[in-house]
Amino acid sequence: MDQSHIAQAADFLWCTRIEQRRIEALPDHLRPRTLAEGYAIQDAMVASAAQPVSGWKIAATSKAGQAHIGVTEPLAGRLFKNFILADGAGLPAAALHMKVMEAEFAFRMARDLSPRGPAYEQAEVCDAVAAMHLAIEVPDARFEHFAESARHRSSPTMPSPPGSCSAPRCVTGGGSIFPPSGFGLSRTVCCSVKGSAPMRWAIRASP
């Protein structure tokens, strides 16, 4: 893809998100053929969004998760400022296509971990974390048949990695729960739908 088509694809996807429209697929000339092209579209979406990037999402961190969406490695995606909600926020569900909520841990970093050859040790990663918060991710897809396209994809050529194609919103808890050890912590996340009894998830921070 050339830069013109990358920018057009980014604008197209951003408009579908803001207008809460569903599409069958990207037009063929705007469709990425490789993971690198998908990330290039995500990079270009920063200009389309015209708002700060407040964080990152990591998806498909397990082999089972990768098999489910047809990829062979974890995927990273940006979290935009206007899509991060405060603890206790309400979110209208009518426009949501996937209607999914996921319990998460959100990490606020004290410093960057720059790319390097050797993998970072667990202790190095924990040392770079300033705080850990409970969070609820609300992913959503703009693609009409998102489940089928993920299951039958033989190469990672969705329009862009998570954070763009999944258009997530994130509700973050207010207080830090970061433990001295960094892992081994269990907590409960809860939410309610239309004032119903809260649904609860038990989650655990593991290495």
Image: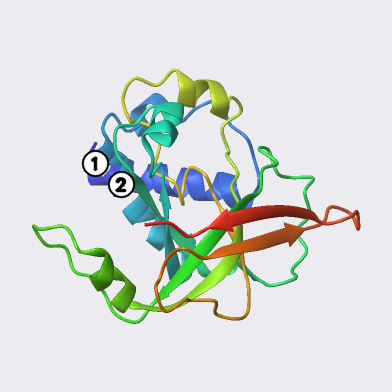
Q: Is residue 26 left or right of residue 203?
A: left
Is residue 83 visible in the rendered structure shown here?
A: no
Residue to which mark 2 is pinned: 39
Give the position of the N terminus as an image quadrant. Answer: top left
Is residue 163 visible in the rendered structure shown here?
A: yes
Judge by depth and name the residue closer to the eye, 110 or 121.
121
Secondary structure category for the residue under label 2: helix
Judge by depth and name the residue closer to the eye, 203 or 40.
203
Q: Amino acid at mark 2?
A: Tyr
Question: What x and y, as percent, mark residue 3?
Answer: 25, 46
Q: Residue at x 64, y 54 (%)?
A: 202
Residue to which mark 1 is pinned: 36
Q: Amino acid at mark 1?
A: Ala
Number of marks in picture: 2
Distance CA(mark 2)–CA(mark 1): 5 Å
Question: What x and y, as percent, mark residue 120?
Answer: 19, 63
Q: Is residue 34 above or below residue 196?
A: above
The type of colouring in the image is rainbow
Judged from this view, the residue extending furthest toward the left is: 117
Q: Residue at x 10, y 58 (%)?
A: 118
Give the position of the C terminus as an image quadrant. Answer: bottom left
Judge by depth and name the residue closer to the eye, 80 or 177.
177
- Find residue 55 and name its label: none
